[in-house]
Amino acid sequence: MVFQVPILWINLIISLKEIIMSVNLTYHGHSALSIKTNGTNVLVDPFIKDNPLTSVDLYSLQADYILVSHGHEDHVGDTIAIAKNTGATIITNLEIANWFSAQGITNVHPQHIGGGYTHEFGYVKLTHAHHGSSLPDGSYGGNPCGFLIKALDTTLYLACDTGLFGDMKLIGDEGVDLAVLPIGDNFTMGPKDALRAVKMIKPTLAIPAHYNTWPLIEQNAMKWKQAVEKETTTKVYVLQSGQSINYKNNQDDSIDNLFIET
Ligand code: NI
Ligand code: MN
């Protein structure tokens, strides 16, 4: 059929446009994420080399920005090596930003809890997190944080390492499309508290993180998905390490344009 060729091309162009206009999130296991939006690569808590859930080569990771939620080794991870390799700007709290500067990293953007800033890829606000934040060498790492990111009409909330807290409701009031929540228990919220968090945040979509890295934080994410989807209207995507989703916010809040890549 003569007409099918141009239609295929039009569909391909539409699909490519959907990908470009969407937020792409790749899970590397534990709390490490790659987010691509507006053509910018943002790495979050890049714990790669010692992360048993990923075999990705840290020198293959693209980064224009690296977000670091707190000082613990499983979050600072390979930030210094990646920042040196890519020249990425590190966004973190003031204390950790100063610590990175002292390690010879010049591109740092310090922020602090409650403070937002519009970076080239979108707006980033540091949110509360109830946890610790000492740095790998024992230095003071300030208070830990989560991240609220607004890019391409999409609002992401990365809770990072935290216990449940009531002000998650205030974060939910900002209209969260996609929330990444720890479910591992022991060091952070477990599945039950993460379900209570979903009820406060009311995201369209939730992704579980910070589990199954070690026996101490082993959890059944599919069981958590079932519980969340039974008790709330939030949809849960359990991403395997290396899997990505594209999220495009629609006016009607539907998630028709969401698809998973492996
Ligand atoms: Ni931690
Ligand atoms: Mn952690």
Image (cartoon, rainbow, N blue to C red):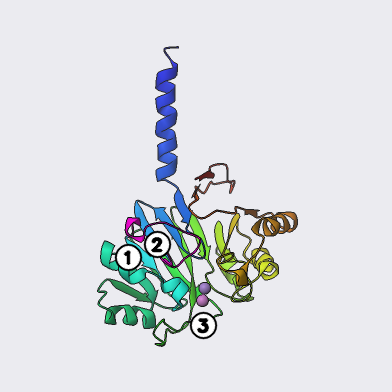
Q: Residues within 10 Å of mark 1 (few under 14, many from 20)?
A: many
The one of 218 and 4 positioned closer to us in this rendering: 218
From the image, tell me which residue sits under label 2: 43
Labelled pair 2, 1 in contact (Cβ < 8 Å): yes
* Left or right position of 233 against 72: right
Residue 241 appears at what percent x and percent y?
51, 55
The one of 30 and 44 positioned closer to us in this rendering: 30
From the image, tell me which residue sits under label 1: 82
- Identify the residue at image location x=75%, y=55%: 230
In magenta segment, residue 60 = yes
Label whose residue precedes the other's in the sequence (3 or 2): 2
The one of 91 and 216 positioned closer to us in this rendering: 216
Q: Main secondary structure of the magenta part?
A: loop
Residue 246 appears at what percent x and percent y?
49, 47
Up/down of 186 relative to 84, above or below: below
In magenta segment, residue 213 = no
- Identify the residue at image location x=45%, y=84%: 134
Residue 135 lies in quadrant: bottom left
Query: Where are the magenta residues, as a range?
Result: 45-63
Q: How many marks?
A: 3
Q: Residues within 10 Å of mark 2 (few under 14, many from 20)?
A: many
Up/down of 196 relative to 62, above or below: below
Secondary structure beneath dot 1 equals helix
Gap in Å between the C-alphas at discs 3 and 2? Answer: 21 Å
Q: Residues within 10 Å of mark 3 (few under 14, many from 20)?
A: some
Which callout, 2 or 1, points to the residue nearer the camera? 1
